[in-house]
Amino acid sequence: MNDKDTTYTISELARAFDVTTRTIRFYEEKNFLNPERVGRNRVYSRRDRTHLRLLLRGRRLGWSLEDTWELIGLYDTEAGEAAQLRAMLSRLTETRQLLQQQREDIDRAESELTAIEARCQRRLDDALDDTVRDSSNH
């Protein structure tokens, strides 16, 4: 059997990518995957498997399905892989910048939480000390 002729069942894809069959059917409904039918069974091609892998990667990176699908679709244009790779590099740069900004925001928020926590703890300690002093004076 030619490697291009390799096919997969919905269960095999679900196991391979640790997703539910419902997830795969969702991508079908959106026309991102186009399995053949053999009787009542769906039969997915290597191309479907690749599309699923790329769609799931895009999701992990926080990209919309439409943006991910647009990148996948560039492969089939006249400019082919070069256009796809240029667009991918641009999108990766944007995503990296966004993640770096989010990391900075998280670091600032964490520092602020630490400062607030320390202030609250000092005020609580002071309030408890005042309570102890007041009760010992009576």
Image (tube, rainbow, N blue to C red):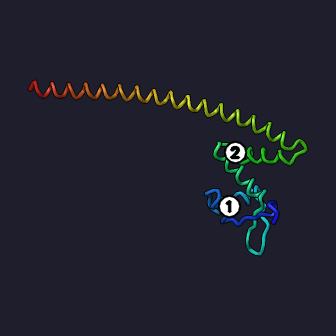
User: From this viewpoint, which residue is outermost toward the left?
Assistant: 138
Q: Residue at x 74, y 68 (%)?
A: 42
Type of amino acid at the residue the image marks with label 2? Ser
Question: Which labelled disc corresponds to residue 13?
Answer: 1
The location of residue 115, given as percent across then percent down, is: 40, 25
Task: Name the side, left or right, on which 121 lies relative to 2.
Answer: left
Note whether 129 is above or below 45 in the view shown.
Answer: above
The location of residue 41, given as percent across then percent down, is: 73, 71
Note whether 88 is above or below 37 in the view shown.
Answer: above
Who comes first in sequence, dot 2 or dot 1?
Answer: 1
Task: Name the side, left or right, on which 125 lies relative to 138.
Answer: right
Secondary element type, mark 2: loop
Note whether 57 is above or below 98 in the view shown.
Answer: below
Secondary element type, mark 1: helix
Q: Quadrant of the C terminus?
A: top left
Is the C-beta separation of discs 2 and 1 under 8 Å? no
Image depth: mark 2 or mark 1 in front:
1
Q: Which residue is mark 2?
A: 64
Q: How many marks?
A: 2
The location of residue 48, given as percent across then percent down, is: 76, 58
Q: Residue at x 45, y 27 (%)?
A: 112
